[in-house]
């Protein structure tokens, strides 16, 4: 395989943008990424678009072609990707494979979503599944995970809530974040209960937004100089669906992490900054364990000790994560790569992780039989 680099990144602010279309949001992120890469539309040889909810919420299909047409990228292969919350990161994985495999020298990857719903409603996803029809919607699924983690490992409500406290403090430093208010522990614990023990501030907000990256070969990356960040590992897995009774981890995530570390020739101890899928507070605790940042069952203590906060041993979600930055479903995976690139370049401003050379982005999408339908892990390196 050829080496693949991120040479340009761009992103819109995440939040509620009722006046803006998918095309409008995607165009802004793509143009920013192209400017950052120093490329014009004619320099792109392939396009990959992550979107999960456009057909259901906006009645749009072929979103990648629409966005890239407005950007001026035409006459090249364009692939639309739907993989639940991992849609954007799966598009990134496909773009990586195209460049690494020699099919394109450059690729533009964009994730875009408009997923803000009326207040008090949930996203209508997975409605065809028997579990969902019986009431096993996402807040309930992750509440069960939290309860089992608490029973097995002694994880406390306070430790789980501290994930939201930490990420809200990080999000307050991020001009792209939807929630920019630092929360206190009593505020998180005292917010309305959604699914015990998960309160309102333990759940990520639905968001509108877009993010984009330009991928290129090593030869093209050398022209970009210090802005180029190497994609050292890119893994995509799906679940085994064996009706597990142990809900304290996802086998698909452990498999994806192992694959990505092996590709990169690195291990958990080499990672200096991490972005994970913290759709609910318990998720980040479990992800830290499955990614090897701590032992199984030790995620709550890792949070409590401050190891994952800015200034800690391995900062997790310096962007504010899904909990504070927001969660436009199809865009979140690409936004993670944008954040890691900014961090490794030293361009993250007040939330900068000092000295980071290796970053990891993890996100998953969908649920079936106790495992994730899709999980990606990307490892980025500043050479």
Image: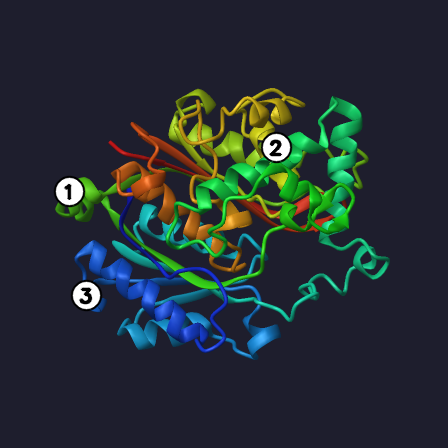
State the residue in front, 295 or 130.
Answer: 295
Considering the image in quadrants, where does the N terminus appear? top left
Helix, strand or loop under label 2: helix
State the residue in front, 287 or 374.
Answer: 287
Q: Residue at x 80, y 53 (%)?
A: 136
CA gap, disc 1 to disc 3?
17 Å
Q: Residue at x 34, y 63 (%)?
A: 29
Residue 51 left/right relative to 347: right
CA gap, disc 1 to disc 2?
36 Å
Upstream in sequence: badge 2 or badge 3: 3
User: Quick check: marks 1 and 3 in contact, CB under 8 Å?
Assistant: no
Upstream in sequence: badge 1 or badge 2: 1
- Residue 225 numbered tag: 1
Helix, strand or loop under label 3: loop
> In this figure, which residue is indicated by the disc labeled 2?
285
Q: Is residue 301 above or below residue 121?
A: above
């Amino acid at each position: 395989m050829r080496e693949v680099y991120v040479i340009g990144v761009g992103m819109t602010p995440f939040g509620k943008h009722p006046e803006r279309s998918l095309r409008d949001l995607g165009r802004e992120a793509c143009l920013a990424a192209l400017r950052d890469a120093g490329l014009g539309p004619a320099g792109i040889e392939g396009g990959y678009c992550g979107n999960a909810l456009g057909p259901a919420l906006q009645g749009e299909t072929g979103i990648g072609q629409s966005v890239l047409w407005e950007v001026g990228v035409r006459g090249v292969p364009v692939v639309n990707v739907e993989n639940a919350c991992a849609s954007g990161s799966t598009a990134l994985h496909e773009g990586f494979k195209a460049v690494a495999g020699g099919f394109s020298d450059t690729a533009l990857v964009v994730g875009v979503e408009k997923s803000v719903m009326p207040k008090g409603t949930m996203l209508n996803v997975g409605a065809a599944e028997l579990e969902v029809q019986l009431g096993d919607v996402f807040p309930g699924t992750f509440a069960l995970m939290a309860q089992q983690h608490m029973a097995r490992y002694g994880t406390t409500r306070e430790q789980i809530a501290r994930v939201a406290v930490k990420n809200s403090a990080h999000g307050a430093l991020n001009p792209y974040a939807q929630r920019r208010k630092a929360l206190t522990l009593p505020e998180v614990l005292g917010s309305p209960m959604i699914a015990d023990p998960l309160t309102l501030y333990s759940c990520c907000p639905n968001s509108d937004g877009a993010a984009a990256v330009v991928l290129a070969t090593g030869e093209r990356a050398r022209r970009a100089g210090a802005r180029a960040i190497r994609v050292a590992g890119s893994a995509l897995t799906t679940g085994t669906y064996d009706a597990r009774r142990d809900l304290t981890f996802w086998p698909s995530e452990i498999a994806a992490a192992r694959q990505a570390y092996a590709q990169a020739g690195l291990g958990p101890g080499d990672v200096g900054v991490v972005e994970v899928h913290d759709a609910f507070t318990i998720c980040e605790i479990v992800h830290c364990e499955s990614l090897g940042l701590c032992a199984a069952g030790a995620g709550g203590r890792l949070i409590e000790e401050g190891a994952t906060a800015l200034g800690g041993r391995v900062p997790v979600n310096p962007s504010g994560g899904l909990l504070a930055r927001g969660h436009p479903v199809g865009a979140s995976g690409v936004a993670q790569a944008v954040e890691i690139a900014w961090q490794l370049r030293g361009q993250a401003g007040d939330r900068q992780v000092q000295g980071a050379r290796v970053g990891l982005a993890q996100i998953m999408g969908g649920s079936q039989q106790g495992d994730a339908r899709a999980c990606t892990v990307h490892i980025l390196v500043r050479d």
